[in-house]
Amino acid sequence: MILTSPRLKSKFLGIPLENPFILSAAPSTDELDIARDGLNAGWAGLMLKTTSLETTRVDLAYPMMSAFRGGEKLLGMGNIDLISTYHIEEVSKRVSILKSEFPHKMIAASIMSDSKAGWQTLVKRLKDAGVDLIECSFSCPQGNVGEDPGKMLAQSVSATEKVAGWVKEAAGDLPVLIKITPQVTDIVTITKAIERSGCDGVTASNSIPALMGIDINSLTPIPNVGGRSTYSGLTGPAIKPITLRTIAEIARHQPGFVISGNGGISDWRDAVEVLAVGASNIQICTAVMLYGFGIIEDLTSGLDNYLIAKNFSSVTELVGKALPNLATHDELPREKVRSFVNKERCIGCGRCYVACRDGGHRAISWDYQNRLPEISIEKCVGCGLCLLVQPVDECLQMRIVK
């Protein structure tokens, strides 16, 4: 059952949203029937997969997907996908169709080009089709438009500002987001360039360039494409900490600049975190590809219940709420904390003992007879390593001591 709640409603760049969850530009938005299914499932809107001019050659290689696992748990997914094989003529038709069928949903489209004429032509054709918002992919290789050919456009401050300016010049009042990469020395120099260009906000951010692994039998990088491979874009839970840091940096240094959060969000708890550091809505790709459109029910109900529990009347009240608690290392309090064993919760596994013995400060000794750890307050410095390996919640506790 699709949840509709007044607490989840908001406006994003003037566009009404029934909830903050948007389908990211991805395979899930690359086929018209699949896109329809996503909107019918309860997603507030979508970004159609990145399109280009008809003159752009799109030559995809298969297989393109791979996984990054920790034991049996999937921590991330990699892809060597590029852009949609559907060019602007077809995508413009789909915009018109979806806007007519879903007038109250946000229908947006992602674009990329390698020239001023190309960018502005794409914008004009999407405007004519009635698109609600345009997202520009500045975080994939953009030919020789950037200062360094073959690099991502958003890795160059000057090229970012110039090309974003071209797009906004053609877009006029139509909202424009620039999709950026965290693969830069200072993300804020990039986003300030985007703000100077007149564009309306950023999507923070995109997949992370990664080598997904090596098959140790054939010594072939993964994914194996006819005996060879290349770098993938890493997505999924593994990149959420990078997403949080990227959004927080922008929000702290550019208060009020609009951010669409994207990268590593799998459930409503992740969504709360991304909103709390400054994003105004949430884009999701990998979790949908792995678990289906139906996760929207958990996302909306979980977030709504959280807002109720925390006495927020609207999702917009949550945006940026964690930022005042983010400080530099020098600003952190220097309280004396130590680890303590909760004997009622301890299961006698010994993991905390081993971790402290070989990776901490050897503050934990082991009572072999009773199978219990014993912590020396004198040796413990409060690093928190033991809490990371505990198999049962609160079998160890960190407390302030005098």
Image (spheres, rainbow, N blue to C red):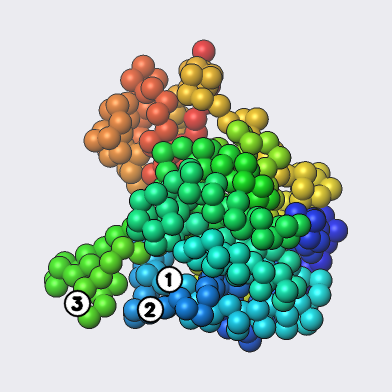
Whether residue 52 appears in this view of the structure is: yes
x and y percentages locating residue 193 in the rendered image: 56, 42
Whether residue 394 appears in this view of the structure is: no
Residue occupying image coordinates x 66% and y 73%: 125
Question: Seen in the image, is 161 located left or right of residue 341?
Answer: right
Q: Which mark is residue 60?
A: 2
Question: Seen in the image, is 331 located left or right of residue 128?
Answer: left
Residue nearest the viewer, comparing 364 with 279: 279
x and y percentages locating residue 285 in the rendered image: 54, 67
First in sequence: mark 3 vs mark 1: 1
Q: Which mark is residue 227?
A: 3
Residue occupying image coordinates x 42% and y 33%: 384
| Three-letter amino acid code of the residue under disc 2 | Leu
User: Considering only vertical position in the picture, is 12 above or below 334?
Assistant: below
Residue nearest the viewer, comparing 56 with 293: 56
In the picture, residue 128 is in which quadrant?
A: bottom right
Q: Which mark is residue 90?
A: none
x and y percentages locating residue 325 in the rendered image: 62, 30
Dot 1 lies on which element?
loop
Cα distance, mark 2 to mark 1?
A: 7 Å
Cα distance, mark 3 to mark 1?
A: 20 Å
Dot 2 lies on which element?
loop
First in sequence: mark 3 vs mark 2: 2
| Outermost residue toward the bottom in this view | 33
| Three-letter amino acid code of the residue under disc 3 | Gly
Q: Which residue corresponds to mark 1?
A: 82
Question: Seen in the image, is 4 located left or right of residue 385?
Answer: right
